[in-house]
Amino acid sequence: MANQRHYILIETIKRLLRRESLARLKKIIGRVHAADLSTVFPSLSTTHRRQLFRLIGDRSEQGVVLSELDDDIVLSIIEGLDIQELAEILQNMPSDDAASFIKLLPQEQADEVLERIRHKGGEDVESLLRYPGDTAGGIMIPDFIALPEDMTAGEVISTLQSKEYKDIEMPFYIYVVDESERLVGVCSLRQLVLVRPDTPLKDFMSTDVISVTTDMDQEEVAKLVARYNFLAVPVVDENLRMVGLVTVDDVIDIFREEATEDILKMAGVGEEFVETKSVVRSTRIRLPWLFASCVGGVIAIFVIGHFEASLQQISYLAAFIPVIMGMGGNVGIQSSTIVVRGLATGRIHIQDLWLVVGKELAIGLILGVIYGLLLAILAQVQYNAIGFSLAVSMGVLSSMSVAAIIGALLPMLFARVDIDPAVATGPFVTSAIDIVSVFFYFQLATFFLGI
């Protein structure tokens, strides 16, 4: 239902843009949430993107739209904006989103925008730019509630009602700091209203505070938030002074980005979206990833060529090559996908290497026995040759068993040497399995048929 609504919205806006029906477009924009409106932009030409963006009159709404779009689309839109317009949009965006936005700009343009917003309270954005974008420091928000440990519950409530904290994005936690401004505790709003007003924070705060450092990788931060079901996690510097928060909405974005990267890598197309890229750029991204598959195919050709004499004697040996390679490849992809996903979510650890490989091998053996018997029966019915049927059944068994080992082992080994395990899948796994499957099949056929 949601997809249908988005489709109707996209088609309606595209049609109104072609007709230049600006009045109706403004009415639609006024009724549609900015996050929903952002789904329209990828389907538009650059000219129509800029036209639609300018029709969004509210700067904060424009900021929301930009924060939801891919970098390429954002750049195509902002190229039509002047420095003053960019500065006004940034001033109405959360600090972390604004910092990510500025990193997309050319250096000269970024410096000009920063100069504009610096005079209007943009110091938070500038401070975030000091951190790499994929770390806790790069994705944190610098607005949080941190109060002295000697402050009473009544004083805290009065403080929260002041104008200073009215725009805080995450008001659900009150962080407690000592006289050196080091993070020493945390309490929730619920705890705050349940205690007597004259109770100091230090008497009812939780001292078991889980925090992250500014240089922690964003994926590790996301796993931490997900593990403990936090709405936010505090970020501290090297002196344990609190400098920001990573909120759950950023964590959701991180999981989405990391999952997308892993899926694209496993498919062998790099780690970037290619729908919005040009044909040349998309080709350039995929070209090196397919090289492993090409090399594997060439090696498989030489392996088959080595058994050319066997094929000449019994031509129907070739009939089962595709199914044996295909079954092995599918099992390998299944195993590698499970392991990569387990490593990414923390459900599988590198220390479990042989346990994981052993489990996948057992699964591969069971599947190999089942499908080996099925294909052996088919081979016997079709060609009435016991030796050939045995070769097929053992070939399937060996192919699927080895595939399960390769599919589980490669990602674990990659992770152990600090290489992204997602790159071990796709062309890498299937190419290795194709070579091994063909080799074992012909070796077994040569043995059982005596050729």
Image (cartoon, grey):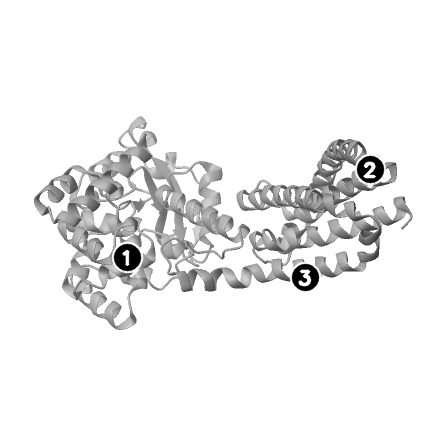
Determine whether the residue tagged by mark 3 lies in a helix, strand or loop.
Answer: helix
Residue at the bottom extreme of this rendering: 108
Return the mark for residue 204.
none
Q: Position of residue 149 (x, y in %)?
A: 34, 43
Return the mark for residue 298.
3
What residue sits right under mark 2 in the picture?
389
CA gap between label 3 and label 1 equals 42 Å
342 left or right of 241 in image: right
Work out whether residue 338 or residue 449 is closer to the camera in this orientation and state it. Answer: 449
- Mark 2 closeness class: few <14, some 14–19, many ≥20 residues within 10 Å: many
Q: Earlier in the sequence, mark 1 or mark 2?
A: 1
Q: From where the camera sits, is residue 240 visible? A: no
What residue sits right under mark 1 in the picture?
74
Determine whether the residue tagged by mark 1 lies in a helix, strand or loop.
Answer: helix
Name above or below for residue 240 compared with residue 448. below
Please identify the quarter of the rendering in which residue 37 is found.
Answer: top left
Q: Earlier in the sequence, mark 2 or mark 3?
A: 3
